[in-house]
Image (cartoon, grey):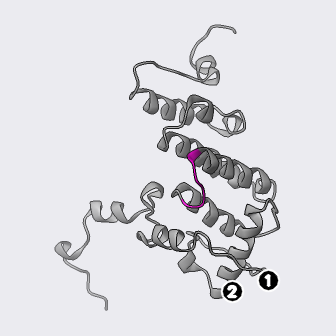
């Protein structure tokens, strides 16, 4: 049989949590993702054949060499404005790069890149509507972008009011003036606008 380890041999809860997904610190199965993203930032491939890719946590290490070739070819096309068909997991790897500050010169450019990839692929992959609006808002807040970014009408309709309220409150707790989007104000007051 298999021996059960003593409690002292088990990692503590904090160790488990610190190993979990933490987008802004680049922890996708360790900090390797961020290091690899920086290394592959400008890597392109002139031509590659599509290779299906599906992973629970899609990262470079979960791709075969052929999948990496396709990813770098597809990403190169994406940056030229050519939104060619691909798999959901490739889109997520690209978004992970953006979340981690790789592949753009300014936060506004990163924000617009996230909006563009989401807009291009949300019909093919409706699951993107569950993740990307929250990730985009989180990106805007993490980069201390202006009010116009975290109240962008392209993402607001996809955000749960409670989530939006909590994220906005968290941001405003750090400032002297409370600034709330109209969508939040109308949801928490009984005044008929």
Disc 2 is placed on an element classified as helix
Q: At x 71% / y 66%, what residue is drawn?
A: 88
Q: Nearer the viewer, residue 183 or 72?
A: 72
Q: Nearer the viewer, residue 34 or 170?
A: 34
Residue 50 locus on image (x, y percent): 78, 80
Within-10-Å neighbours for mark 1: few <14, some 14–19, many 20+: few
In the image, taking residue 178 as reference, residue 11 lies left or right, namely: left
Residue 147 locus on image (x, y percent): 57, 29
Q: Are marks 2 and 1 in contact (CB under 8 Å)?
A: yes
- Quarter of the figure with residue 53: bottom right
The answer to whether residue 70 is above or below residue 166 is below
* Between discs 2 and 1, the one toward the N terminus: 1
Q: At x 44% / y 73%, what residue is drawn?
A: 32
In the image, taking residue 93 as reference, residue 176 lies left or right, namely: left
Residue 42 inside the magenta-drawn segment? no
The answer to whether residue 150 is above or below residue 7 is above
The span picked out in magenta is 102-107
Disc 1 is placed on an element classified as loop
What is the chief secondary structure element of the magenta stretch?
loop
In the image, taking residue 78 as reference, residue 178 lies left or right, namely: left
Q: Where does label 1 land, which residue?
A: 49
Q: At x 82% / y 68%, what residue is drawn?
A: 85
Q: Where does label 2 land, which residue?
A: 66
How many numbered discs, if any? 2
């Amino acid at each position: 049989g298999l021996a059960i380890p003593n409690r002292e041999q088990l990692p503590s809860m904090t160790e488990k949590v610190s190993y979990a997904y933490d987008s802004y610190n680049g922890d996708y199965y360790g900090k390797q993702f961020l290091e690899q993203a920086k290394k592959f930032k400008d890597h392109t491939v002139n031509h590659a054949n599509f290779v299906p890719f599906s992973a629970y946590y899609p990262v470079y290490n979960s791709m075969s060499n052929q999948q990496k070739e396709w990813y770098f070819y597809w990403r190169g096309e994406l940056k030229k404005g050519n939104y060619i068909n691909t798999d959901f997991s490739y889109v997520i790897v690209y978004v992970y790069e953006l979340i981690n500050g790789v592949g753009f010169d300014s936060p506004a450019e990163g924000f617009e890149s996230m909006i563009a990839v989401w807009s291009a692929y949300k019909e093919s992959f409706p699951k993107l509507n569950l993740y990307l609006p929250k990730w985009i808002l989180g990106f805007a807040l993490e980069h201390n972008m202006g009010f116009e970014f975290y109240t962008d009408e392209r993402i607001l309709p996809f955000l749960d009011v409670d989530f939006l309220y909590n994220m906005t409150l968290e941001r405003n707790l750090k400032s002297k003036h409370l600034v709330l989007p109209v969508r939040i104000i109308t949801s928490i007051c009984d005044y008929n606008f």
